[in-house]
Image (cartoon, rainbow, N blue to C red):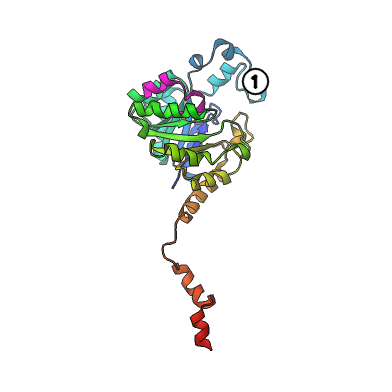
Amino acid sequence: MAKLIAEIGCNHKGDLALAKEMVGVAGRICQVDAVKFQKRNNVELLSSTQYHAPHPVPSNAYGDTYGAHREALEFTPDQHAELMEVCAREGVIYGTSVWDLTSAKQMAALRPAFLKIPSATNLHFDLQEWLCANYPGELHVSTGMTTAAEVESVVRFYEDRGRAKDVVLYVCTSGYPVPFEDLCLLEITRFREMYGSRVREIGFSGHHLGISADIAAMALGATVIERHFTLDRTWKGTDHAASLEPDGMRRLKRDLINVNKALTYKRTEILEIEEATRRKLKWEPATQVAAQ
């Protein structure tokens, strides 16, 4: 069955207590397999101009400048270690996206089960080179806003370093939220055909509304499903509107389990559940002859 990752990301609003609460809700109520956070070194990631510019959407800002906004949403490595401990108690896997080399080194030192390369930095090969050499866990790579040739170059990069079988390669469209016509779910089929035997798994990272597309993604062969997670979609921030609240995430997990059960061939020509109904209702030539 497809594994379900609840991306808390920055939806904790910079509040560690809230982040811990979200881990508990995702684990106990929604029964997700993993949660994912994000780690950025904003001084390294942003130019001075970007850092000191105002947030482009002031209503979503947690600081006077974009840099201050980003800093307000960051946790320290020690706080991420606390979150890993909470995840262990709640029985969910901890992972985080790393946006720059400093963050990659800090998070790799915690030895989480997986680290993710977001779509924005999947061509940052210095970062990925360091991870290939120093981090032994799973490497999840998202492919939003990335050309087919660039995706191929990323996969070959990992193959050349003997790490491709540690890679979970995600089909993704970078938008918040993404309309259904831009989800392009058949890319999952293409990824399976081109990369299914070359990487560890093919995943789907969705920023859409509802849960129907995620079920289709699993039916098409995605074995990891990632969705943004929030406790309240009306909260301030870019990602909340494209996130699932607890009941939505719970329903998604339920539906993934049930649809996975349904994705089988018939075990016998007449299933056991059909036998009594067949005896009662089925028109059969031999039965009709005997009746005459």
Graded by Cα atoms within 10 Å as few (under 14), some (14 to 19) or many (20 or more), the crowding at tag 1 reads few
Would you place residue 260 above or below residue 193 in this image? Answer: below
Would you place residue 232 above or below residue 43 in this image? Answer: below
* In this rendering, position of residue 264 left or right of residue 51: left
**Label 1: which residue?**
56
**Residue 247's spot in the image, x, y percent?**
56, 45
Q: Determine if the magenta segment contains residue 122.
A: yes
Residue 227 visible at all: no
Q: Determine if the magenta segment contains residue 135.
A: no
* In this rendering, position of residue 102 left or right of residue 230: left
Q: Determine which quarter of the picture holds residue 84.
A: top left
Q: Nearer the viewer, residue 117 or 150?
A: 150
Instruction: Say which residue appears at 45% left-offset and 30% top-offset.
Output: 141
Would you place residue 230 above or below residue 154 in this image? Answer: below
Would you place residue 244 above or below residue 111 in this image? Answer: below
**Residue 226's spot in the image, x, y percent?**
50, 38
**Residue 120's spot in the image, x, y percent?**
52, 24
Q: Nearer the viewer, residue 111 or 145?
A: 145
Instruction: Say which residue appears at 53% left-offset and 15% top-offset.
Output: 46
Q: Nearer the viewer, residue 24 or 253?
A: 253
Q: Tell me the magenta residue range.
A: 116-131
Residue 129 visible at all: yes
Instruction: Say which residue appears at 49% left-offset and 39% top-offset.
Output: 190
**Residue 192's spot in the image, x, y percent?**
45, 40
Q: In the displayed image of the protein, which residue is found farthest to the top?
A: 48
Magenta region, main secondary structure = helix
* In this rendering, position of residue 160 left or right of residue 178: left
Total numbered circles = 1
Q: In the displayed image of the protein, which residue is found farthest to the bottom?
A: 292
> Dot 1: what SS?
loop
Circle 1: residue type: Pro
